[in-house]
Image (cartoon, rainbow, N blue to C red):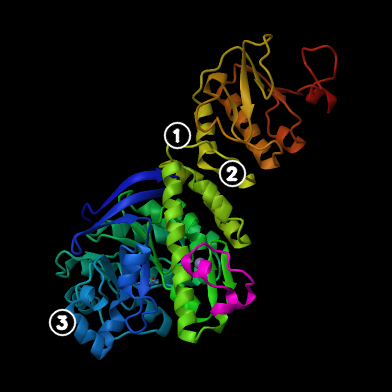
Amino acid sequence: MGDWFEVRDYDAAGRIGELTVPRADVTVETPALLPVVNPHVRTVEPARMEAEFGAEILITNGYILYGSDDAREQALSDGLHDLYDFSGAIMTDSGSFQLSEYGEIDVDTREILEFQHDIGSDIGTPVDIPTPPDVSREQAADELATTQERLELAAEVETGDMLVNAPVQGSTYPDLRERAAREAYGTDLDVFPVGAMVPLLNDYRFDDVVDTVAAAKRGLGADAPVHLFGAGHPMMFALAVAMGCDLFDSAAYALYARDDRYLTVRGTEHLEDLDYLPCECPICASHTPDELETCDDAERERLLAEHNLHVTFGEIRRIKQAIRQGNLLELVEARARGHPAMLDGYRALGDHAEQLEATDPATKDAFFYLSGESAARPEVLRHHQRLERLDADGEILLTEGDPNAAYDESWRVVPPFGPFPRDLSEVYPLNAEVPERLDERAYAQAADGVARLAAANPDVDFTLGHTGWPARALDRVPEAVDTYELGVDDAFGDDEGEADDERA
Ligand code: GUN
Ligand code: ZN
């Protein structure tokens, strides 16, 4: 691949990047949304998407253009940019999705890629095979081999300065996805869509989406722009961006509008269920649900599609701002509260903390602890790794309370991080904002931090002074560490009680 993609800022594995699209002579800022333009039904005109919604790139179906006589001739003679009156970048798909829906298409990779080139596409797509989730491993591997052959063929086709997608398949087998990604990255192709996600997305299997993206990312270099093919619901953009996705395409804005569905960042509503329009966009500010209901069908569809687009682009801007400020994971956490399946997705993200840690910046705006899921953030993992490298000597009190001169040193303890020397108190992430009323996972992680520190320093005498941690957290603290509850069992104080161990 060429040097078409540059990352500017990271937060977790999410990034703001610049995708240079040479044939369109434009640079697209990522994360970016590609509205899907249906060659036959333009619910919102592409020129308006550019002027009023800020679309820098769109996607349309090369195979549908190829198969329809009128549109095909016009696309060939005028070019896509004139046909759509759109000056940004245009990506085209190949018919693979039709292949997955209807079982066959009558075109091969060379022919459809050359056609995409001839109609002026800026980013073309070979005919990959979108293997669905949960098929046999044998089927997934066989189809992947065919996809890989086609990627290699695509790299040989004469396509000038058109960029070419290298879709990553492999069904729900993470090792196949990772291998597919590594092989795709090894070709000369340019953009890396994670494919066949539509069935997972339609079934709200966001945890499987996260695991699949994580696997693909392991096989790709950091300089690979990653597209989540078929993902257009704004409620999951923050989650997908945090895993490292850069491009999304939305047919949802139009498909949902067609049957009166109203997108929000927390989920989907039916227009008939709305007494109010919970959105700030120009459509919602100037209409009531009744007014929308009583429009004629085409008008209502257009207005709902515009609202859906506003919400979708708005979420992309919010995500970019969150990356800049370093609070993308707080945004993901908020989105995870919109639907239980989103919470599964966020919990799955926590399983990949080590992968996210690799690109997570060393300092950001203050870490906000917002739920038990915050305890699984990469910053906590990184602190635990760091604990093993901190110098410790003598008798050390690890305490949630004040320093105690009876010890050589008194370190602070802050759940979910665990212990650290006091002079790190103002350093990210230890300057975290943490609620007064913590949950068990915060204490458990803090206890694991104590255990990690103790294991790395077997010759140091550690004592833990805590504010009444639950027994299940204290059980994670090794025997060698004395523990007492502050203000209750003051080990060196007057006489108020005994240490936890003696009391037990
Ligand atoms: N659109 C949605 N999913 C896919 C996919 O897996 N491959 C291609 N080419 N297009 C898609
Ligand atoms: Zn709106």
Check the image and report above or below for 54 versus 351.
below
- Whether residue 265 sits left or right of residue 224 in the image: it is right
The residues tagged by marks 2 and 1 sit, at their Cα atoms, a distance apart of: 16 Å
Query: Which quadrant is home to the C terminus?
Result: top right
Mark 3 or 1: in front is 3
Mark 3: amino acid: Ser
* Nearest to N terminus: mark 2 or mark 3: 3
* Image quadrant containing the N terminus: bottom left
Answer left or right for 188 relative to 42: left
Q: Residues within 10 Å of mark 2 (few under 14, many from 20)?
A: many
Distance of label 2 from label 3 (alpha carbons): 55 Å
Residue tagged 2:
374
Q: Position of residue 310 (x, y in %)?
A: 45, 65
Q: Position of residue 282 (x, y in %)?
A: 47, 66
Looking at this view, is 168 or 368 the one in front? 368
Three-letter code for the amino acid on which mark 1 is drawn: Thr
The stretch in magenta equals 272-292
Determine whether the residue tagged by mark 1 lies in a helix, strand or loop: loop
Q: Quadrant of ligand 1?
A: bottom left
Q: Earlier in the sequence, mark 3 or mark 1?
A: 3
Mark 3 and 1 residues: CB-CB less than 8 Å, in contact? no
Please indicate, yes or no, whether residue 203 appears anywhere in the rendered image: yes
Which residue is pictured at 58% across the width and 52% down the height? 334
Q: Identify the residue at horizontal 20%, vertical 79% (top origin).
A: 111
Disc number placed over residue 77 in the picture, else none: 3
Q: Secondary structure at mark 2?
A: helix
Q: Is residue 172 above or below residue 323?
A: below
For label 1, the crowd category at 10 Å Cα-Cα, with few meaning under 14, some 14 to 19 and many 20 or more, is: few
Q: Amino acid at mark 2?
A: Ser
- Residue 363's disc is 1
